Amino acid sequence: MRLVGAGLACVRGGREVFSGLDFAAQSGELVAVSGPNGAGKSSLLRMIAGLVPVAEGRLVLEGGEAELSLAEQAHYLGHLDAVKPSLSVAENLRFWTGYLGGGGIPASDALLAVGLAELAELPAAYLSAGQRRRLSIARLLAAKRPVWLLDEPTSALDTAAQARLAGLMRGHLAEGGIIMAATHGPLGLDAAHELRLGAVQ
């Protein structure tokens, strides 16, 4: 499996964020997306996730499921954690698992993997920022998709939770998954290569 971007251009609000961008990520690879603020790191991840239109160029997941779009084969973990406060932790995860198609590990196991098993019946409104982030990470495990798009994934996580995330990322890569991660801090594992974006002048 290979995620390929060729000649990509992104335009947002009438401004060209980046253009002529080429990259490739193989199965089992972590690509670190770097660059200054405004260079388009989040926009690139959102473009791959189908949330931002491709102004120019081509995006394709070679070797993926032919009947599914790239967006349907990718998980996007953004800055905001999509948590419904009136639902319990477990209900939130079950909702997203059903919506995203499942296919991963059972929801109870996913909560255990991120250290939230004991809070499964707690209303999500009572979660801390770090706990909400861990609940979002649990979605990656409960709904199986080959491409993970992680935008500042360690945000709000303490040292123990960052280490747990690094372990989950290693597991995904070991299974042949692809990860593209934009972060200013360490992820706890080495990237296959760096994709550096430069701000458009």
Image (tube, rainbow, N blue to C red):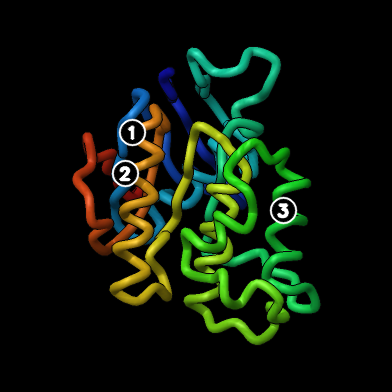
The answer to whether residue 121 is visible is yes
Q: In the picture, which quadrant includes the N terminus? A: top left
Is 19 left, or right, of 123 in this rendering? left
The residue identified by callout 1 is 174
Name of the residue lying farthest toward the bottom: 126
Q: Is residue 73 above or below residue 190?
A: above
User: Dot 3: within a 10 Å radius of its alpha carbon, few (fewer than 14), some, or many (20 or more) residues?
Assistant: some
Q: Is residue 174 above or below residue 108?
A: above
Residue type (three-letter) at the residue carrying disc 3: Trp
Which of the 4 image quadrants contains residue 80? bottom right
Q: Are marks 1 and 3 in contact (CB under 8 Å)?
A: no
The residue identified by callout 2 is 170
Between residues 136 and 90, which one lies in front from this camera angle? 90
Q: Is residue 98 above or below residue 136?
A: above
The circle on residue 96 is 3
Camera-nearest label, 1 or 3:
1
